[in-house]
Amino acid sequence: MSEPREITYAQAVREALRQAMQRDPQVFLLGEDIGVYGGAFGVTDGLLDEFGSERVRDTPLSEAVIAGTAIGAAVTGMRPVAEIQFMDFITLAMEQLVLQAAKMRYMFGGKARVPMVLRTPAGSGTGAAAQHSESLEAWFVHVPGLKVVMPSTPYDAKGLLLAAIADDNPVIFIEHKLLYKTKGFVPEEYYTLPLATSEIKRKGKDLTLIATSVLVARALEAATQLAQEGIEIEIIDPRTLKPLDTAAMIQSVCKTGKALVVHEAPMTGGFGGEIVAQLCASEAFDFLDAPIRRLAGLDVPIPYNRELEKRAVPQVADIVREARALVRGEY
């Protein structure tokens, strides 16, 4: 493998799309403003010039049409990568995704394949208010037949997206908007990462912290601060929420005896509850020195006001406070 270069998350996603399209003529892109405009966040910029309008297709402003077209193309032999501009509007494509894409392979006894990826930017932090800032990943984890991927780094974004495009099942690929400009080391060549492998982002002995998406970076920053107090946090990123790899989480909790689960989506019904349930049903339960804690978004729509927006979802200071209290037994 060549020496990795440092590129942005958005560049890593674009490179994955480009390499997948170069390798397989059945891969094509579709979505609102992804061609001439280059996508709402510039991720597909330049791909129209390189591959033409047959393979980079601007669509009408209809999420139902985008998802339905992708599903139809997938079951007839193509490998579409669809983009929904904001995850909030994936709600307009729920029938197509939940009742059609997720069910087809099962209902046809495995004879039908639905090799499609639906990319969508999620999350708060851009001042886009309640209708453009949601994190709805738990909805799709609940649906049998869908795979759900939520990478936190440029390296993971490229490898997981290439794996998702190569997969014969529908994949919901969630990209946090605040991650697009973040940088990381990414190999130039084609590579894939398994769609069922969590990763330990930082080693530690005092607390297992399981975080997703943009909260991974905040957790790492919090861990650096806590290390100055002698508290060593082990951070695990699931990367793929479904199928979920719990092996590293269980092993880590058996070592540390304490666990904190952090995500941006609201607490009630959030994916963190599933992680807690699986840990409690495993051998890790016998090693717990304290109840598992969750730190998540408030059960409110995302506010437009910047200060209120920050207060609605976990920030670095919140993670530091919760982790410190859990390690010190202050609950």
Image (spheres, helix red, strand yellow):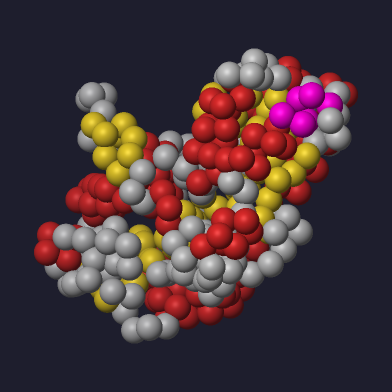
Q: Looking at the image, which is closer to me, 285 or 107?
A: 285
Q: Where is the C terminus found, in terms of image quarters?
A: top right
Residue at 53% over, 75% down: 131
> What residue span does the magenta drawing correspond to?
324-329
**Residue 277 higher or lower than 232, as above or below:** below
Name the image quarter holding residue 28: bottom left
Judge left or right: residue 196 versus residue 85.
right
Q: Please say if 291 is above or below 283.
A: below
Q: Main secondary structure of the magenta part?
A: helix
User: Splitting the image into 4 quarters, where does residue 120 fall?
Assistant: bottom left
Q: Position of residue 209 (x, y in %)?
A: 66, 32
Depicted 17 relative to depicted 281: above or below: below
Q: Where residue 100 sits: x, y (%)?
A: 56, 72
Residue 175 seen by the camera: no
Front-lying residue, 134 or 54: 134
Q: Is residue 21 visible?
A: yes
Q: Is residue 116 magenta?
A: no
Along the viewing direction, whichever of 36 and 161 lies nearer the viewer: 36
Give the residue at x 76% y 48%: 273
In the rendered view of the protein, which quadrant contains the N terminus? top left
Measuring from the top left, give residue 35's x and y in whole percent.
Answer: 22, 70
Q: Position of residue 22 (x, y in %)?
A: 20, 51
Q: Residue at x 47, y 42 (%)?
A: 152
Task: Give me the residue at 59% from left, 67% from top.
Answer: 302
